[in-house]
Image (cartoon, rainbow, N blue to C red):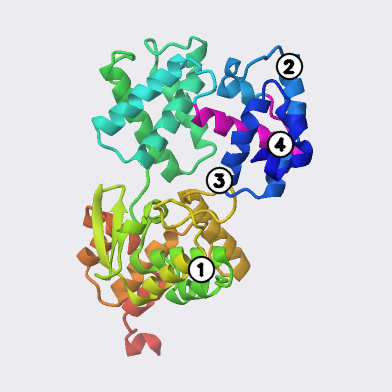
Amino acid sequence: MLAKLFPRINARVVSLRILGPLLDQFVVDLHSRGYGALPIRLRVREAPRLEARLRRCGIRDIRQLSRDDLLAFAPRDAAADVYMAALVHSLVRFLDQRGLLKQRAATPAEQLLSAYSSHLQQVRGLAASTVVHHQRTASEFLSFLGFESGGGLRDLQPVRIEEFVRRLGERVGRESLQHTVAHLRSFLRFLEIRGEVPRGLQFSIDTPRVYRGERLPRSLPWETVTAFLKAIDRSTPMGRRDYAMFLLVATYGLRTSEIAALRLDDVEWRASRIRVRRPKTQSPLVLPLTDPVGAALLDYLRHARPSLPLREIFLRVRAPSGPLAPTAVTEAFQKWTRRGRLPIPYQGPHCLRHSLAVHLLRQGASLKAIGDLLGHRSAESTCVYLRLHVEDLRDAGLDLPAEVRS
């Protein structure tokens, strides 16, 4: 394929001793990921320069390098050498998937974090996204202690834990810090079970006070939600995809992870139903497929979805092709908010869930029905979404007596 796409540079790059035998399959891989001819050519053109750098470092076979070793050849300032950086990162992904890179031995911290991840999944049954947050806190804590440099855990004292929490408190709010403290307590309990730390350390951390109902409601006026959906340009493939995604959020209150996890098999067209995988409760929810949602999905699937052998509904429009990540849903929300110049102070589509909950409550839906739709296990979780708005308080106010008004 390399000779077919780039006959002029083919002879020059195929003769490379280290990278040459890999480049044809590398080009095939890039093409299958949706890259166009020009981006592929600009990457391949940098191969002789990368080969020269490898040979100057004494590399004679790509299998001598680990993932981190090869990433070290990427320029520090990617903007100053765009296509060398692109070549290195694309090559790392290509080689890593095929097992052609040297496997680096896991560090003690990585081994401990891997064991902790298994504990969270197999013993505590936490969702994958929750495990990621726990691991991030645990990794940061080990780094703070200098675990890889010999910072031991067996003589860990509460004062060091408090110092770590205090540093975190300088850059995060009370609600985020409350979650982080919960993650840290979980990690300390795990270390105690393994006999790695003194007993009872998890009880030495004080959690910041967060009072129920202290924050203002995060819901938007339903007119703003409608204006947001209308602001999405549905004349482009990306606009069709994003409109279908956010109509799903506004209709069913889906999370970003649930949007990204939707598969073609989850839509039962004949039965007019859609099945939503709930990562937090680990139980699917079957909902009626409304006509507007069905029409938006059909419009996207017929006219905008890339023709790829993937079962996920929502795919990337730009290369590299593949399923959409939850973070991409958030980025799309921010983009359409900016373009529509809408008064939305929130950075993610989670506010649409809050808006739907309040909208349904005002339509007369019960608290239980709203909680079931949002995938909540307890009514207390649903109540967080239904904090009173200023307009609701005005409606609840009593008229002043006549003598006071006069």
Residue behind mark 3: 32
Q: What residue type is labelled 3?
A: Ser
Does 96 lie within the magenta span? yes
Q: Distance between the residues labelled 2 and 3?
A: 30 Å
Residue in the image at 70% along x and 20% along y: 17
In the image, 29: left or right of 297? right
Label 1 neighbour load within 10 Å: few <14, some 14-19, many 20+: few
Q: Which numbered disc flags the more N-terminal residue, 1 or 4?
A: 4
Residue behind mark 2: 55
Q: Which of 69 and 265 is in front in this view?
A: 265
Q: How far apart are marks 1 and 2 (CA)?
A: 48 Å
Q: Which numbered disc flags the more N-terminal residue, 1 or 3?
A: 3
Residue behind mark 4: 44
Label 3 neighbour load within 10 Å: few <14, some 14-19, many 20+: some
What type of secondary structure mainly makes up the magenta span? helix
Q: Which numbered disc flags the more N-terminal residue, 1 or 2?
A: 2
Q: Which of 391 and 117 is in front in this view?
A: 117
